[in-house]
Amino acid sequence: MELKRAFKLLRKDVWALVSAAYILTVTLVAVFAYPLSSDKTQYANQMHLSIHSQPPGFSCNILIIPSGESENNKSFFFGHINKNEEIPIKEIRWFDNRLSFKRYGNAISYFEERSFDQFPQGTTRKKIEAQYLKEKHFILGTDKYGRDLLSRLIIGSRISISIGLVAVIISLFIGVLFGSLAGFFGGFIDKLIMWLINVVWSIPTLLMVIAITLALGRGFWQVFIAVGLTMWVEVARLVRGLVKSAKEELFIQAATTLGFSKSRILINHILPMLIAPLIVISAANFASAILMESGLSFLGIGAQPPMPSWGGMIKDNFRYLLLGKPYLAILPGLAIMSLVLAFMMLGNSFRDALDVKS
């Protein structure tokens, strides 16, 4: 009943609705990242060094020289490995069985030639113009490697959503397990678990994450596990206190008097009472996990290149803050800030709704 009342109150909270809508939008973008991206190569890692650091709204023609290998590696959710050569060009000229072009950004202005024989058999000028010559638009410009900044921002959202989800699941599993055992059984078990919680709590979080990451090795899932293993202590402390309070409720004492097993009392009667507080702390942990992963990626021990991460994008481009193109670092920073803010506001709104006594 308390949870239903909280959701009714949340529906009247404008900022809670805006935050929830934004989180849902980012989640959908993360799931369908490649269909939404203009660069559909794996990790949006198609480099064009000749057009690096171009401003938002930049566009140019791209000439695609096929590799001759069949493209059977396309994936709706994971992109594809592009084996074709993509050449940004400024000018193109046509001849009977060949073409010549000027590369974009080439300091020495000269034409290069390609024979029609480098394209599939029977290819004509009209077919090349239709299939192998594309005008590409870079809505947010390109990074220092000539990659589409918007595509990497979109695919980078997967890291932030995934790290938050996995970290919250790990912290809930360990925290609820240890906290419920400590709060329900008390005695030696409570002292042992509280000693472990205090030890973990005393170690700086970032230092512990770095140590776990280095122990497990650098990688995508290693970071997820490392962040999750450092966030369970807050959950455990919360659950322990709530379980100890719940044990004093009359219906719990009645269930104990009637001879219900401890596991039945804990699982069927006490743990369901913890759902609402756990939702609140999960929202905060979700935001903390995103910040933690961004910091690790900035330090170079988070998601590894070429996998796009918002923190890694700031690391790659933070020098441009002083070189006249600050948006390269500011845009991923704004993405991190907005998503963290949405989770914090949603968690605060839920907490306020649960505190209402009417």
Image (cartoon, rainbow, N blue to C red):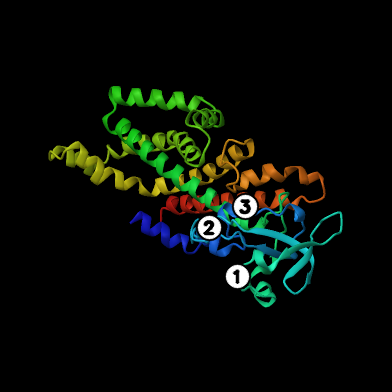
Q: Amino acid at mark 3?
A: Asn
The reply to whether residue 342 is visible in this rendering is no
Q: Which residue is mark 2?
A: 79
Of badges 1 and 2, the one in the foreground is 1
Identify which amino acid the numbered label 1 is placed on: Gln
Q: CA distance from mark 2 to mark 3?
A: 10 Å
Write down the quadrant of residue 147 in the picture: bottom right
Residue underneath mark 1? 121
Spatial CA distance of label 1 from label 3 is 29 Å
At horizontal 38% and vertical 36% (from top left) the residue drawn is: 175
Q: Position of residue 225 (x, y in %)?
A: 45, 38
The N terminus lies in which quarter of the figure?
A: bottom left
| Quadrant, the C terminus | bottom left
Residue drawn at (50%, 60%), measured in percent from left and top?
74
Q: Earlier in the sequence, mark 1 or mark 3?
A: 3
Query: Residue 93: percent from the left, percent from the top?
Result: 79, 70
- From the viewer's side, name the closer residue of 164 and 47: 47
Q: Relative to the observer, which residue lies in front, 31 or 244?
A: 31
The reply to whether discs 1 and 3 touch (Cβ–Cβ < 8 Å) is: no
**In which quarter of the view is residue 301 placed?**
top right
Q: Position of residue 104 (x, y in %)?
A: 79, 59
Side of 195 where 64 appears, left or right: right
Type of the residue with mark 2: Gly
| Numbered disc in front, either 1 or 3 | 1
Residue 174 quadrant: top left
| The label number, if any, that marks residue 45 in the structure image | 3
Pointer 3 local density, CA inside 10 Å: few below 14, some 14–19, many at least 20: many
SS category of the residue bearing label 1: loop
